[in-house]
Amino acid sequence: MLFPSSTMGNYFHAFILVCSGSCFIISPLLAGNVLKDVVMVREDTSVTLSCFDSPPTSSVLVTWKMMSAREDRWSYLLSANCIDGQTDGRSSRVFGGRTFEISADASLIFRAAAAVQGHYSCVIERHDKKLQERIVLLALIKLTVTPTPPVTVDSTLRLAAQVSPASVAAWGTWVSSSGEQLYTEISHDKGSLLSKLPRITSKDIGVYTCRIRVHGNNATSVSEHRVDVTVNESAVFSFKDVTHGVSRSLASLSHSPVTLTCPQILGDYVLLYWEYPGKEMELIFQFDRWRRSSTSQTKPQLHLIDPTSLAAAGNFSFLLRPALKDGGLYLCEVFLDDKAFSQASRLSVLHVYAKSSSSALDLSCMYSERSQIKNIRWSYVQDPSRLLQSAAVVGRITTSVALPVTNETAGLYACTLYLKNGNFIQYMYTVAMANTDPTVSPGPALPPAGVEQSLSHHSREVENIYENPDDLRQTPPQGAVYMDLKPTGELDVYKELDRYNQCCA
């Protein structure tokens, strides 16, 4: 690549970037020099280094020297007499396994390679007196595309640039064929720039550009290097290296937050599937951290946790505030290059509502994802030994409190759902007498007709679950959430505000 004399003419020092995989160390002899200009070329491409700011009007001697990256002394390369900007003959020399040649205008011509990286000096002399010296740094940048195009549909393409010495790169990015700037991971200490194209399709065919600005260069001067990406549309990539995590069993109160974790790896993209009992599994969320794109299909109450940091780093997890109908199997798949990792979570959701008549207050527990439930029952917290009469149908259990409420029937009623893995979740309901004297009210003082949700720290999978229901008699409820109830209509049916518009049946 030509190093134009017009850009060289304004500076005493300059340096060049060339593509390769090895690293350079800037010689301490030149550490104090301010390197003003940068030209980037790729490995095994032609390099032309100009010596003159402007052609000399009298006879001068031009001498080219080189100091490799691993040395601290100059080595002689070539010399030529020059009159009116033209040499008296072209000469060449093999050095470091490469051929160097002086052109007609005294420029140094060679092919860039790791073996000849380093500093280059052009000294102009007249009558053994130095008139000018120009120093050029030859550095390397290597561009790689993995796998080698044409790539298979649905595979993950890696676009990598390696700059050496790493210290010369001030800024860089990869740009798509459509001109869109791709998310690029930059390692300044290693001089690397990485971007990826997960789940590649024919739409991704085109020319991709690596743009780099080097320290010392003009702030608006950016060097560009291009690679071609082609796709083999007749072949589809299949993930054969799949790691399955241990399935998790979860329970949540309706509309309370529950975390759906994914395999904790530095992944490229994530897919979340949901399967409701008796229905087909469907894709409900996808996120590509390289293209910075996400799609949520069916659940507005589901979102990726902190996508700007955790997901950006490739650690994915979801926060869900489930309704009763959101119970089921959630399958999270994380993909990294040609590997896939999956994590399944089975979620049961518990929802409680109350309905009153002239003679009784009916408390109903509804629950979903029954396959992992061992048992569900109502209990009277103040006296767990008291047997409550319950009516059960598939997905619901109901107990009734006779009206009016008395000292014997007022207090906390707990609906406890037990999972087969030993975890359980409770939903507590406070039944209070009208004009209750707080001094005789059983349990902690609670708002009239309040609903209390409570989960204790029984395990890491089910949050806020009481380890022993008897603890409720000594321990005030923690993290309680109260909801007012109000009578509606002639049947005096209590409905939860901000929950459902009508009682679930």
Image (spheres, helix red, strand yellow):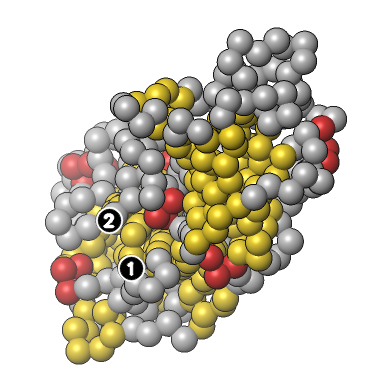
Contact (Cβ within 8 Å) of mark 2 with mark 1:
yes
Query: What residue sits 78% from the left and 34% below the top?
Result: 382
Q: Which residue is mark 2?
A: 297
Q: Position of residue 57 (x, y in %)?
A: 18, 42
Query: What residue sits 26% from the left and 49% below the top?
Result: 181
Location of residue 374 by image quarter: bottom right
Task: Please state which amino acid type lies under the numbered disc 2.
Answer: Gln
Residue situated in front as seen by the camera: 478 or 297: 478
Compared to residue 69, the image places residue 223 above or below, namely above
As drawn, the label of residue 29 is: none
Q: Position of residue 75 (x, y in %)?
A: 52, 61
Nearer-N-terminus badge (2/1): 1
Location of residue 466 by image quarter: top right
Q: Quick one: SS at disc 2? A: loop
Residue situated in front as seen by the camera: 396 or 300: 396
Tell whether 337 sits left or right of 250: left
